[in-house]
């Protein structure tokens, strides 16, 4: 069979083309595996602060070149965020534990805790939930508080339709000062920004103190409704002197969770959790509420199950260095050996260089036949440069003849 030997320039061109294609494929693979992953996150609150807070985290992830990025989608309310998540429109969401369908949700971090506060204007005689019968209570953020209102109505025997009425945040001050409502119900974090907002709803003076109404049955409610827990508001939280409340006040508390779809990979959520816990420390100066970011319950019977990726971080069960990079450690020498083989083949394909150079390349590409630091046996197909290229019994040296000659 006749073989066609290509010109040197054509062989060199083909080799350069192969190298360019291989390099391009390698760069594409590198970019693919190192490119940051962007996750969509739905948030919503009555004052828009939830979107601002998550946007601050998203910006910090970009500035620190984090492997995970966030695309914030403002859904308007906590219920809107929960609905977007349950519909599969986003990967993550910031939700209240008592709002929306969370069957596909797995907890990543607790963003904050929100407390149920029922406040009446100064001079009000309403000092218990039972005395709300026959009065109107304005509910701020009514859509997100539907379940809460149902729970309170059932517990205290209140007629929901007659007692509770939804109000938008901008209308709350007008409603209570015009006596359209006798009290306001609001669910907020115990942070100064939100407490200042609450103080602005009622007129205050040295002797005009607002009334905070306790939810004395909070413990019983928490037993039957696991989205809530009993919580004592510390004395003087709303006002220091004279203190409001004048003693620790029992009420209900719920949690704001950052949740992920349970189908997201564990490695991705581990990275996300670790990154958020890291950047939160950097953002405390800008957003003091980030101090409330903490780990969710790791108990098996927790109200909202923990995502396996987040659980790996909190329980310290992440993959070890060898578990994560062991395959690379073992495959790298093999890849280098393959590269040396390709180099030797390319050199031979070009047909340049002497026998000794080709011999050295052959030895480097096949270390298992010789190896470094060992004497290398001459391959049978490399022979001395003599006139005769074959050996026979006639021209082979005879040791007996040589001895006699001496």
Image: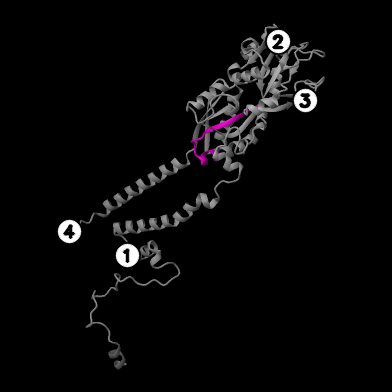
Disc tally is 4
Q: Earlier in the sequence, mark 4 or mark 1?
A: 4
Q: Secondary structure at mark 2?
A: loop
Q: Which residues are magenta?
A: 253-271
Q: Earlier in the sequence, mark 3 or mark 2?
A: 2
Q: Residue at x 36, y 58 (%)?
A: 341
Q: Quadrant of the C terminus?
A: bottom left
The CA span between labels 3 and 4 is 99 Å
Q: Position of residue 349 (x, y in %)?
A: 29, 57
Q: Residue at x 30, y 70 (%)?
A: 382
The CA span between labels 3 and 2 is 23 Å
Front residue of 16 and 113: 113
Pointer 4 local density, CA inside 10 Å: few below 14, some 14–19, many at least 20:
few
The residue tagged 4 is: 2
The residue tagged 3 is: 248
Front residue of 175 and 395: 175
Do the CB atoms of the residues marked 3 and 2 lie less than 8 Å apart?
Answer: no
Q: Which mark is residue 182?
A: 2
Q: Secondary structure at mark 4?
A: loop
The residue tagged 1 is: 354
Q: Earlier in the sequence, mark 4 or mark 2?
A: 4
Task: Answer above or below: position of 390 versus 30.
Answer: below
Q: Position of residue 258 (x, y in %)?
A: 58, 31
Residue 163: image quadrant is top right
Q: Position of residue 380 (x, y in %)?
A: 30, 71
The CA span between labels 1 and 3 is 92 Å
């Amino acid at each position: 069979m006749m073989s066609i030997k290509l010109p040197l320039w054509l062989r060199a061109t083909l080799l350069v083309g192969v190298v360019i294609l291989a390099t391009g494929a390698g760069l594409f693979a590198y970019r693919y595996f190192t490119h940051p992953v962007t996750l969509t996150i739905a948030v919503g609150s009555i004052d828009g602060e939830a979107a601002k807070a998550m946007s601050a985290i998203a910006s910090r992830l970009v500035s620190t070149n984090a492997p995970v990025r966030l695309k914030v989608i403002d859904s308007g309310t906590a219920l809107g965020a929960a609905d977007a998540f349950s519909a599969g429109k986003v990967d993550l969401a910031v939700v209240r534990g008592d709002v929306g369908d969370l069957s596909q949700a797995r907890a990543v971090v607790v963003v904050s805790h929100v407390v149920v506060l029922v406040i009446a204007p100064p001079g009000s005689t309403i000092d218990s939930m039972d005395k709300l019968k026959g009065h109107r209570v304005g509910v701020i953020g009514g859509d997100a508080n539907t379940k809460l209102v149902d729970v309170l109505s059932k517990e205290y025997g209140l007629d929901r339709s007659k007692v509770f009425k939804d109000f938008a945040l901008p209308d709350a001050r007008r409603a209570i000062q015009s006596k359209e409502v006798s009290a306001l119900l609001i669910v907020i974090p115990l942070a100064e920004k939100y407490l200042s907002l609450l103080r602005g709803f009622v007129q205050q003076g040295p002797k005009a103190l607002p009334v905070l109404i306790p939810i004395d049955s909070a413990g019983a409610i928490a037993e039957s409704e696991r989205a809530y827990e009993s919580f004592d508001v510390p004395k003087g939280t709303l006002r220091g002197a004279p203190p409001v409340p004048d003693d620790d006040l029992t009420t209900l508390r719920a949690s704001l969770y950052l949740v992920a779809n349970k189908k997201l990979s564990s490695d991705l959520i581990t990275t996300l959790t670790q990154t958020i816990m890291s950047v939160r420390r950097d953002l405390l100066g800008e957003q003091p509420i980030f101090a409330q970011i903490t780990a969710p319950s790791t108990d098996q019977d927790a109200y909202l199950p923990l995502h396996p990726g987040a659980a790996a971080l909190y329980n310290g069960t992440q993959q070890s260095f060898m578990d994560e990079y062991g395959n690379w450690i073992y495959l790298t020498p093999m890849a280098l050996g393959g590269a040396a083989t390709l180099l030797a083949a390319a050199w031979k394909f070009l047909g340049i260089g002497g026998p000794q150079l080709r011999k050295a390349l052959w030895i480097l590409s096949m270390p298992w036949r010789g190896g470094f630091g060992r004497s290398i046996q001459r391959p049978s197909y490399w022979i001395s440069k003599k006139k005769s290229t074959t050996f026979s019994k006639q021209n082979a040296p005879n040791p007996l003849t040589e001895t006699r000659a001496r």
